[in-house]
Image (cartoon, rainbow, N blue to C red):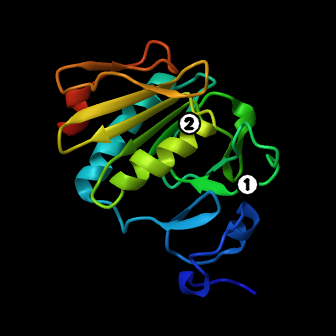
Amino acid sequence: MTITNLNQLDLNASYSYADYLKWQFEERIELIRGKIFKMSPAPATKHQQYVGEIFRQISNHVHRSSCKAFVAPFDVRLTPIHKAESDKIYTVVQPDVCVVCDPAKIDAKGCIGAPDLIVEVLSPGNTDREMNEKFEIYQENGVKEYWLVEPNDRIVLVYLLDETGKYIGLKPFTESETLTSQSLGSFQLLVRDIFDV
């Protein structure tokens, strides 16, 4: 049966990436541990400007390198690195910005496996998901670096994966500070530049 409307699905059921590929509706969703999460309606203009500026600066930095930057909507398919059923995909997310440095992870449908860097810009309605579910998903799937951009306080929270596979949070980066990326070598971004677009 072809699914053309989100209302045809049971939001309490669990689904796989194979199911996800069959759906033909316009609503944007993410699949986290097999559960459907509706994405917010079209993000606010400011949100898009912040995402655009981060993407522009990262994309310029990685130009002509093995690393590639992507902006949502872009499917990232994840399987936990310590799970026996790693052939089954139950998580498909669309990060605001992600950087993939292993070309083997990029295919015609997006990214398969953990990007090196994921950036999510918080907005009303997504803060809980980005700071809880996605934090855990990105950690257990081996995303090396996770940035949470907080427009209200004009700060960026940076989490780095340590040798035990757990995120270590750095001191928040404020407007006057320059962000650097462990994953992107010499990349630098003045936090103020994100918000003064």
Is 19 rendered above or below residue 170?
Answer: below
Q: In the rendering, which numbered label is found on residue 89?
A: 1
Residue drawn where x is 17% and y is 21% of the image: 176
Is 48 rendered above or below residue 138?
Answer: below
Find residue 177 and report its horizontal and vertical position in percent.
22, 19
Q: Secondary structure at mark 1?
A: loop
Q: At label 2, which amino acid type do we have? A: Gln
Is 187 rendered above or below residue 25?
Answer: above
Q: Quadrant of the C terminus?
A: top left
Tell me the residue that label 2 is attached to.
139
Residue drawn where x is 66% and y is 83% of the image: 3
Q: How many marks?
A: 2
Q: Is residue 140 left or right of residue 130?
A: right
Query: Between marks 2 and 1, how big is the CA–CA gap?
Result: 16 Å
Label 1 neighbour load within 10 Å: few <14, some 14-19, many 20+? many
Q: Is residue 194 left or right of residue 32?
A: left
Find residue 83 and report its horizontal and vertical position in percent.
76, 43
Q: In the rendering, which numbered label is found on residue 65?
A: none
Find residue 184 and report its horizontal and vertical position in percent.
50, 20
Q: At label 1, which amino acid type do we have? A: Ile
Q: Is residue 140 left or right of residue 176?
A: right
Q: Earlier in the sequence, mark 2 or mark 1?
A: 1
Residue drawn where x is 69% and y is 57% of the image: 90
Residue drawn where x is 36% and y is 38% of the image: 148
Find residue 98 and report its horizontal and vertical position in percent.
51, 39
